[in-house]
Image: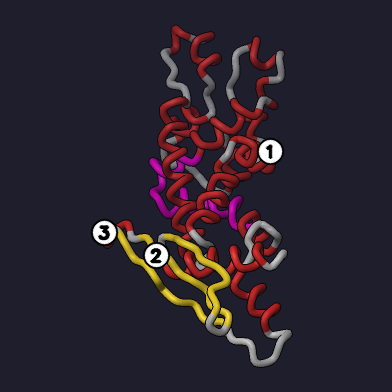
Amino acid sequence: MNEFEKIINYNFKDKSILTEALTHSSYANEHKRQNLKYNERLEFLGDAVLSISVSDYIFNNCPDLPEGELTKLRASLVCEKSLFLFAKKINLGNFILLSNGERKTNGSERPSIVADAFEAVIAAIYLDGGMEKAREFVLSFVVPEIKNHTAGKAFKDYKTKLQEIIQRNPGEKLNYVLVGESGPDHDKHFVVEVHLNSNVIGKGGGRSKKEAEQQAAREALELMGY
């Protein structure tokens, strides 16, 4: 346990909660007399802590991403595949307590088992040290991935792309016009048209004006063959 704590750079005040996070149900069943707790409940809590940590970060640090892209980005970061890759960086599989049967069938390398244990570790840190410590742990893995994502092709700044194309023709002018707004304050929907001079060349909707503008620009680019 001490070795694992050094790897994750966090020392538990309550070591038992770390043990629980690293205990698979197969191991607990194999040692029933010890009445061991296993990590399924912690996995449930860790999933929630992971989601709010990622959501909060990308909401505040990716201001130009529309809601749809935020959802896709979060999903890519909290999926089993990503969690398994994060867990491999800290050799988590080597520390999971598994039954002899699971160990012999390479359970320590099974994505579902390892990813679940990773979520359980998040929950353990949250319960032992609070939300900020859990958030620090989560972000140490996801921030590099977020930076790669937003620097790559996953997000297209359609407005900038459209502006660059229109600027090739001096005298042409783009304008975004809000033409619709509906829904209660907590769940607004906006509709925006993008005008080239006086002509409508695209229309889009979203939960913010920025998102609606991006979607209008995207439609304009598609209609223009880009």
Amino acid type for the residue under numbered disc 2: Phe
Residue 22, relative to residue 143: is it above or below? Answer: above
**Label 3 close to label 1 by CB (< 8 Å):** no
Residue located beneath label 1 in the image:
88
Where is the N terminus found, in terms of image quarters? Answer: top right
Residue located beneath label 2 in the image:
190
Residue 222, relative to residue 116: is it above or below? Answer: below
Name which residue lies at 56% across and 84% down.
197
- The answer to which of marks 3 and 1 sits earlier in the sequence is 1
Residue 47, relative to residue 180: is it above or below? Answer: above
Residue 165: x, y in percent? 70, 78
Amino acid type for the residue under numbered disc 3: Pro
**Label 1 close to label 2 by CB (< 8 Å):** no
Q: Which residues are magenta?
A: 122-144
Disc 2, SS: strand
Measure the C-alpha gap from mark 2 to mark 3: 12 Å
Q: Main secondary structure of the magenta part?
A: helix
Name which residue lies at 56% across and 49% down.
72
Residue located beneath label 3 in the image:
184
